Image (tube, grey):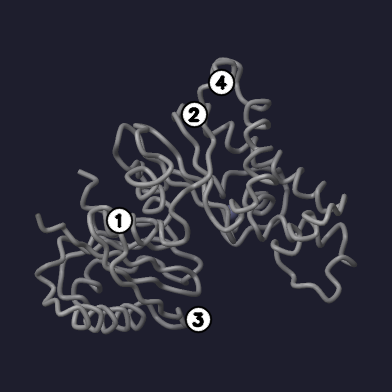
């Protein structure tokens, strides 16, 4: 039997991945594009359209073989209308992306937030297989969160469900790109962890890259200061996740993003702290699973390609 094939496009702050996948999530071919700062949404979508047509041609496809094209963007999207409402990393506000993509790709598209696409991929094919309700928290430059409830992606009435990264963690806290002060992601994302370390121990970053990986590499060498910074970040994140679990009561919390590779430093202690900071009513049952994502950096692209399964 011929497998259904579909396509996913994952647009990030600096790169976009475009790929053709089969119904089991296997990436048949993919291509990566640079996202050029200051480039308009229209220009980027036209470039993606050109790449899309080249990709089809390279496979000998006409386009009719493709069941669906799904797109993930790092911001607030109305999936019903295809309107990208707010996407600060790309500088997009109220962009009718659905219409623009339809024109550039010559086909209908489904658009959602990238973190929802990643959660959907993990739900269908990754660490979330078998769960009915789960959340997938992505720790990267920011903190993303996709929610699946009873086997469906949850968007919320204002398309903003899962904005865990922009929940206020600290009154009068650090200023966030979103305009608020004290957002959780300013403390616990990769960027937040680096800034926390750099503020307290700037000398550690002389001649070393100014990024979260440096903090983790030093921690791996048993640097006590960096271990403490990571532990504080994990405890703060555990409070955010415990609050989310109290509200949604999912079966599973999946941790994804580049930093989930530091499983011993992030995920293992996070499990303990989420239980410590969780409401007794659920935490006493010890049923909640907190696990590492399985699908890696292509998860948003794969999930976007499989959005047609969210019915
Ligand atoms: Zn914020």
Q: Which residue is mark 4?
A: 286
Ligand 1 contact, mark 1 (Cβ < 8 Å): no
Rendering quarter of residue 105: bottom left
Q: Nearer the viewer, residue 282 or 298?
A: 298
Q: Which residue is mark 1?
A: 25
Q: Which residue is mark 2?
A: 247
Query: In the structure shown, which secondary structural element does the residue marked by tag 3 occupy?
Result: loop
Determine crowd level at label 4: few under 14, some 14-19, many 20+ residues with C-alpha closer than 10 A.
Answer: few
Residue 157 is at least partly visible in this image: no
Image quadrant where one finds the C terminus: top left
**Dot placed on the residue nearer the N-terminal end, 1 or 3:** 1
Q: Which residue is mark 3?
A: 37
Q: Judge from the rendering whether residue 38 lies leftward or rightward of residue 121; answer left or right.
A: right
Rendering quarter of residue 210: bottom right
Determine crowd level at label 2: few under 14, some 14-19, many 20+ residues with C-alpha closer than 10 A.
Answer: few
Distance from disc 3 to disc 2, alpha carbons, whole Å, reads 37 Å
Distance from disc 4 to disc 1, alpha carbons, whole Å, reads 31 Å
Q: Determine whether label 4 and label 1 are within 8 Å by CB.
A: no
Q: Is residue 131 above or below residue 59?
A: above
Q: Is residue 116 above or below residue 90?
A: above
Distance from disc 3 to disc 4, alpha carbons, whole Å, reads 46 Å
Q: Judge from the rendering whether residue 172 lies leftward or rightward of residue 13; answer left or right.
A: right
Distance from disc 2 to disc 1, alpha carbons, whole Å, reads 31 Å
**Circle on res. 292:** none
**Dot placed on the residue nearer the N-terminal end, 3 or 2:** 3
Determine crowd level at label 3: few under 14, some 14-19, many 20+ residues with C-alpha closer than 10 A.
Answer: few
């Amino acid at each position: 039997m011929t497998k259904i094939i579909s396509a996913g496009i994952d647009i990030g702050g600096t790169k976009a991945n475009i790929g053709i996948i089969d119904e089991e999530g296997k990436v048949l071919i993919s291509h990566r594009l640079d996202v050029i700062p200051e480039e308009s949404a229209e220009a980027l979508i036209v470039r993606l359209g050109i790449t899309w047509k080249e990709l089809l041609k390279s496979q000998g496809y006409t386009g009719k073989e493709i069941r669906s094209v799904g797109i993930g963007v790092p911001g607030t999207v109305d999936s019903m209308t295809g309107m990208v409402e707010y996407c600060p990393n790309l500088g997009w506000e109220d962009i009718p992306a659905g219409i623009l993509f339809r024109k550039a790709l010559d086909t209908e598209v489904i658009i959602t937030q990238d973190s929802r696409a990643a959660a959907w991929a993990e739900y269908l094919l990754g660490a979330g297989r078998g769960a009915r309700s789960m959340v997938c928290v992505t720790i990267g430059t920011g903190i993303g969160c996709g929610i699946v409830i009873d086997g469906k992606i949850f968007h919320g009435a204002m398309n903003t469900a899962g904005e865990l990264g922009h929940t206020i963690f600290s009154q009068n806290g650090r200023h966030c790109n979103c305009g608020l002060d004290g957002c959780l992601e300013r403390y616990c994302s990769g960027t937040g962890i680096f800034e926390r370390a750099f503020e307290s121990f700037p000398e550690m970053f002389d001649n070393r890259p100014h990024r979260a990986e440096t903090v983790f590499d030093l921690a791996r060498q048993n640097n006590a200061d960096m271990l403490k910074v990571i532990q504080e970040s994990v405890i703060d994140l555990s409070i955010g996740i415990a609050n989310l679990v109290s509200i949604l009561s999912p079966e599973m919390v999946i941790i994804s993003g580049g930093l989930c590779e530091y499983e011993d430093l992030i995920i293992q202690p996070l499990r303990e702290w989420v239980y410590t900071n969780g409401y007794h009513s659920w935490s006493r049952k010890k049923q909640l699973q907190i696990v590492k994502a399985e699908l890696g950096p292509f998860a948003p692209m794969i999930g976007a390609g499989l959005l047609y399964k969210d019915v």
